[in-house]
Structure formats: structure tokens, C-alpha cells
Amino acid sequence: MKFLISGGTGLIGRQITKLLINNGHQINILSRKSKISKTLNIKYYLWDPKSKKIDERCLDDVEVIINLAGSSVFSLWIPSVKRKIINSRLNSLSTIYELLNNKKHKVKHLISASAIGIYPNHQTISYSESSDFKIKSYLADVVQKWETKANDFKKLKLKVSILRIGLVLSKNGGILEKLIQFNKLRIVNTIGGGNQWQSWINIDDLANMFYFIAKNKYEGIFNAVSPNPVSFNKLQDFVSIRYKKPFINFNLSKYLFTLPFKILNILDFYYDMIASNKKVSSNKIQKLGFKFVYKSLENLK
């Protein structure tokens, strides 16, 4: 198969690209900067979703599009940043949609990233893809609009798959890298006791899940999380034991920790990101035959 990947130069995109290349596939990657490929199996094409510009040659012989594009949510949510987060996701999909709608192509399947941020925080509920819940937060609203835009591709007679991605664990980036860095300093702050549920996935399993869905042409929404969510304390303990430098743990009260966010008027960032508490199920993808390599933290390299 030949793939087109938006967001292909990011942490997840690089891992998926490596997996696809190792399995003999060809990849076109959309990039905002001109790049020269070091292999015949990868080609880069310029695009600028903000101005809806894209090199139409990126679709040549492509059968599957993997959409990972979107500005990072790990930044303080002042109004301009919030606009960038939502617009980057919607503009990216809109740009690809318009190209597909106006150019002859061979694309049959869109697989789009999403996030478990669509689910509300809750200590006891385990969320599945069919869970009934109300949208109450900024992040959930972003994800809902993101998924709606992806589902629009069904109007073009494409199969559409959406992966609601949890906390991605990789030593090369993301939250695990940050925890390792804090661990080297032997200091960490715990908020509210550290009992918040963390629904995570190893980056290798995540890349394999995208490929599994592409190979089997599965449609619908899938939670991209490991079978065993853990508390934030458990995640910290894993890092501490694995890297043999125990934490000095400062357990801050919720009032003290939220005060700066209240002053900056970005309290929603605290609840959606810092105090995220979501227990999410991956039963649906497992019933289809997907096998996790890293089912629990103890399996991680």
C-alpha cells in the first residue's frame, strides 16, 4: 500500500513511518518545510493548512491517508493558543478534503488521530467508544469538532477510522521523557494525591494499531490505550524504580496548585491536562484481534 501522512514528522508520525517502511510500503509525507528524503520509499510534499495550500502530487497512487496534524495541546491555553489548537486540526482536514474533492485519486481510507480528551474526568467510570457522555470542557469540544470533520470524509465515499489516543509513552518525547527528566532531579509534584487515572499507550503499540486498522480496513472509532490504565502515582513509581532514583515527592494541595491557573484565567488547562483523570477501555480493538505488546507498565522496555 501507499500512504499519505500528515503530521508525519512528529513523534507518532516518525514511528508509524518507520513501521510502514519496515513492512515494504511507500509513504508520502506532508510537511510545512521543504525536505529531501534519504530513501526512495519516502517522499515529502509541501503544504500550508493555514492558507489551505497543498501540493496535489501528494495523492499520487495513495490508498490510505493517516492524519496526525494538529498543534500541540501542551501549552498554556490563552485565547490565541486555543484558536491555534482548533484551527490547526480543522484546517488540516479541510485542506485534504478539498484536494480529494477536486482531484482524481485512489484514496479509499482515512485514519485520523483523535484524543481521549473527549471523555470527562471521572474516578470510577470506565469509558468505551459507545459511552454516553456530555461535552463539558474546551478539550472535549475540540475533539468533537475534530472527529466531526474527519467523519465528513464519508461524503467522499471513503472509509473513516478514528483513534482516540491516550497518554503516549516514549523515551523520545512526551510525558515519559519529562518524567524521566524530573526523576534525574529526584523531585516531582503530586496533585490531589496522585490517584488520577492515566490511560496510556506505548508508542510501538500505537503505531501497530494504525497499521492494523489500515491492513484490515476497519472503520469506526477506537480507543488507542493499553488494557491496563494506572494511577499517576503508579506511573511515577514505575519511572522511579526503572531508573533507580527515588522521587522526593511534594504533594501540593489543589488550592495552591490551581491558584496560578485561576490568576491567568486558564483553569480549564488545569482540569483538562494537569488533573486529567480518565479510565478508558481498549476492549473494542482487542476483540477485533489486535494484540498489545505492552499491556502493562512492567512490559515496557
Image (cartoon, rainbow, N blue to C red):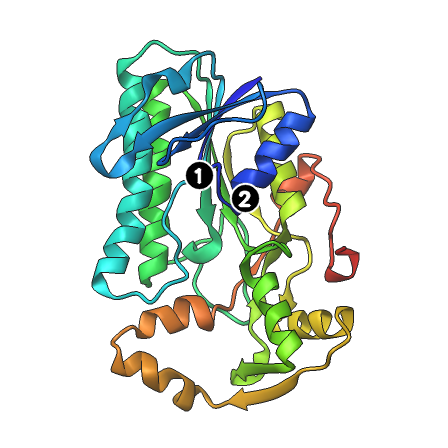
User: Seen in the image, is 25 located left or right of residue 107?
Assistant: right
User: Seen in the image, is 46 located left or right of residue 35?
Assistant: left
Tell me where residue 69 sits by quadrant.
top left
Q: Amino acid at mark 2?
A: Ile
Q: Secondary structure at mark 1?
A: loop
* Crowd around label 1: few <14 · some 14–19 · many ≥20 (10 Å): many
65 versus 108 height, above or below: below
Give the camera-side residue of 126 and 278.
278
User: Seen in the image, is 100 located left or right of residue 246?
Assistant: left
Place of residue 157 in the rendered image (x, y in percent of width and height, measured from the top left): 38, 18
- At a point 35% along the width and 43% down the height, the residue shown is 146
Q: Which mark is residue 191?
A: none
Residue highlighted by disc 2: 12
Label 1 near label 2: C-beta < 8 Å?
Answer: yes
Residue highlighted by disc 1: 7
Give the camera-side residue of 296 and 176.
176
Q: Amino acid at mark 1?
A: Gly
Q: Secondary structure at mark 2?
A: helix
Place of residue 73 in the rendered image (x, y in percent of width and height, measured from the top left): 39, 57
Give the camera-side residue of 190 and 225.
190
Marks 2/1: CA distance? 8 Å
